[in-house]
Image: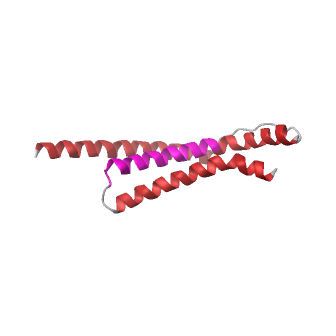
Amino acid sequence: MRWAGLACALPALLTFAYALWRLDRMLRACAAGSMFALRTVGDMKAFVAGILTALLLTGIEPALRVLVWRHGFGAAARPLNLGVSSEELLLLLVCALFFVVAAMMHEARRIAEDNEGFV
């Protein structure tokens, strides 16, 4: 039963690990001076998308665990609870802000390329 619970939580954990890996790549690129490179902007977008996906999977995981235990192991029937906390809403807002920053970085890169063409 513990392994089934771990299997239900594993997708969210792996998605979060992927998001952190993309954040590490983005921060290393920024430290190397390529802040507005396409790869850096792509890493930022992938980080935010990974965090949002992990947030969604974390919200679904308790209900999935109840269903697996009920139908797979014959556990007692429990109500399915899906809820959103204020911390999750704040994280959603921060992710939206990061998407806006990534879009601004992409536009700044495009403007810099246009300016290089004029000179």
Residue 4 placement, left or right of 99: right
Q: Magenta segment, principal secondary structure?
A: helix
Q: Quadrant of residue 32?
A: bottom left
Locate residue 4, reporting x and y percent: 77, 48
Residue at point 36%, 49% (across, down):
39
Locate residue 55, reporting x and y percent: 60, 45
Residue at point 30%, 60% (across, down):
33
Query: 99 or 43: nearer the eye?
Result: 43
Locate residue 93, reporting x and y percent: 51, 43
Residue at point 71%, 38% (across, down):
82
Rendered position, 8 above or below 28: above
Residue 115 placement, left or right of 3: left
Write the start and end of the magenta stretch as one range: 35-57
Locate residue 115, reporting x and y percent: 17, 44
Residue 24 placement, left or right of 39: right
Rendered position, 1 above or below 68: below
